[in-house]
Image: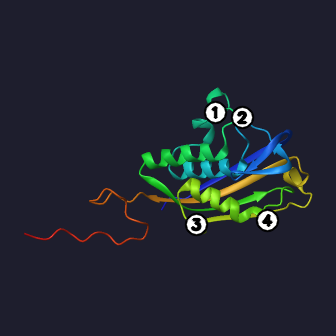
Amino acid sequence: MRVGLGLDLHPRDPSRPLHLGGLRFEGEAGLAGHSDGDAVCHALADALLGAAGLGDLGQHFPDTDPAIAGIPGPMLLERVVAMLAERGLRPERCDLTVLAERPRIAGRRDEMRAVLARTLGVPPEDVSVKATRPEGLGLTGDGVGCLAVATVVPTPKAPPTAAGAADPPGAPPPPPPAAG
């Protein structure tokens, strides 16, 4: 069984919009970064890369690469999912936690789960989104940053069936060929 753990942290940048989990949070100070600063998508991508033994996000998407300047978090995450597919893996489940005083995630949790599930290619019930407020403690509690932590479990991709389509997750294996 493979498991990946990802962590991403960005300082606030009030000149940028805030993107977390593929959602834009209006009226909130954004996060600094070479991309859109989406700490949630970055933590998930890092967890997936780790689970697949592919290193980390900075190896594949360095902040010196002008081609990824401003890239949206979901697009970066899609690229990582494609990298896993090349290794015969696909995301199965993920669990993530956002640590920040702001924004409040609860009101948009289901929307974030849906965006992340669509990006990962899994049902929304296989994406857990939690948030906690540090209540004034430390880097994220004083409002100068946002931290996201993600755990993922990838699984081998289902082999194509005779019709060319992959079996759905949990499908029984095909029967053995008839003797004779």
Q: Are marks 1 and 2 in contact (CB under 8 Å)?
A: yes
* Among the two numbered marks 2 and 4 on one chain, the one whose residue lies closer to the N terminus: 2
Residue density around tag 3, few if under 14, some if 14–19, many if 20 or more, within 10 Å = some
Q: How many marks?
A: 4
Q: Which residue is mark 1?
A: 68
Q: Is residue 65 visible?
A: no
Q: Secondary structure at mark 4?
A: helix
Mark 3–mark 2 Cα distance, whole angstroms, equals 29 Å
Mark 3–mark 1 Cα distance, whole angstroms, equals 28 Å
Q: Secondary structure at mark 2?
A: loop
Q: Secondary structure at mark 1?
A: helix
Residue density around tag 1, few if under 14, some if 14–19, many if 20 or more, within 10 Å = some
Q: Which residue is mark 3?
A: 126
* Among the two numbered marks 4 and 3 on one chain, the one whose residue lies closer to the N terminus: 4
* Among the two numbered marks 3 and 2 on one chain, the one whose residue lies closer to the N terminus: 2
Q: Are marks 4 and 3 in contact (CB under 8 Å)?
A: no
Amino acid type, callout 3:
Asp
Amino acid type, callout 1:
Ile
Amino acid type, callout 4:
Gly
Residue 33 lies, with reference to residue 162, above or below; the image says: above
Q: Which mark is residue 34?
A: 2
* Among the two numbered marks 1 and 2 on one chain, the one whose residue lies closer to the N terminus: 2
Q: Which residue is mark 4?
A: 107
* Among the two numbered marks 3 and 1 on one chain, the one whose residue lies closer to the N terminus: 1
Q: Taking 102 as reference, is 37 left or right?
A: left
